[in-house]
Amino acid sequence: MGSTHQSAPRWFILPLLFLLLAAPRLFGQELSAREIVQKMDTLLRGKSSYTKMKITIYNPDWSKPRVMELYAYESTEDKKAFIRITSPPRDQGTGFLKIGYNLWMYLPATERVMKIPPSMMHQSWMGSDFTNDDLVKESSLVNDYEQKITGVETDPEQGKVFELELLPKPSAQVVWGKILLRVREQGFVPLREQYFDEQGRLVNEMTFSQVQEMAGRTLPTVWEMHSTTKPGHRTVLELLEAQFNLAIPPGTFTEKNLKTRN
């Protein structure tokens, strides 16, 4: 007598196989470290962006803080960035243009365009606690570093928070020897970034605050960088306006535009 058992039809097996393979993600498996950093980076930068910022530099040797306002365009897909300082008058018109791993600076007082070599990417940007790399994002937290989750905790105010360690890939042209991140799971908003040199010494620390809705996103609108090697030195970046995934005006990322002072 033949068996009455019948194999499941193929149209049933294939969807079942897909569900089994996808089950870890569907049932709440944690994202990878790279995915967390990617989501944080996408939140802050998008595929393209336009931002207006106010930067206040505090130096204990100065009688008062230095305040600058500027705007910036960035195309993360094309690895291009453009920054123009709009105030104070003595710095008005100063511009920065990044294309790939190349960075130029325009000084209106001398009407000169200077190329900034890769060796100067770790240098201070306009006397602030930010580096040239921090402002123009020559390096990528997603592509130039290996990411690892080192801890997960629950914060009373922020909820679930990921702690991550980023180490540069051997061939990457980066400034830092290690970066530590704290990123909350809700919205993948960054809370803190710590920057270490190649000897493992903590050099700079940036904290993010004043999280609010801007350009349809939940963003930290105040970024404060302070030096751990120079007491009393800190720089506060305030995000005044932002647009994401926009069509950037033609000619933005050109030397001609760099010299226009607009």
Image: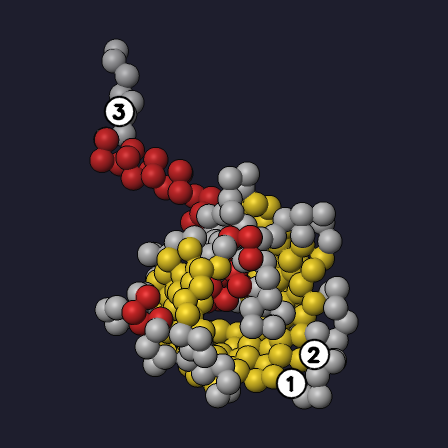
Residue at position x 42%, y 55% from top? 102
Residue at position x 51%, y 85% from top? 90
Distance CA(mark 1)–CA(mark 3): 80 Å
Tag 1 and tag 2, C-beta contact below 8 Å: yes
Tell me: residue 121, above or below residue 32.
below
Q: Would residue 170 appear left or right of 105 to someone viewing this image?
A: right
The disc placed on residue 180 is none
Percent of width and height locating residue 189: 53, 67
Distance CA(mark 1)–CA(mark 2): 7 Å
Tell me: residue 210, above or below residue 14.
below
Percent of width and height locating residue 247: 26, 69
Residue reaching furthest to the right: 231
The disc placed on residue 59 is 2
- Total number of numbered labels? 3
Which amino acid is tagged 1? Pro
Percent of width and height locating residue 232: 75, 75
Residue reaching furthest to the top: 1
Of 256 and 12, nearer the camera is: 256
Please, what secondary structure does the residue beneath circle 3 have? loop
Which amino acid is tagged 2? Asn
Mark 2 and mark 3 lie on one chain; the one further toward the N terminus is: 3
Asked which quadrant contains residue 179, the reply is: bottom right
Residue bearing mark 1: 65
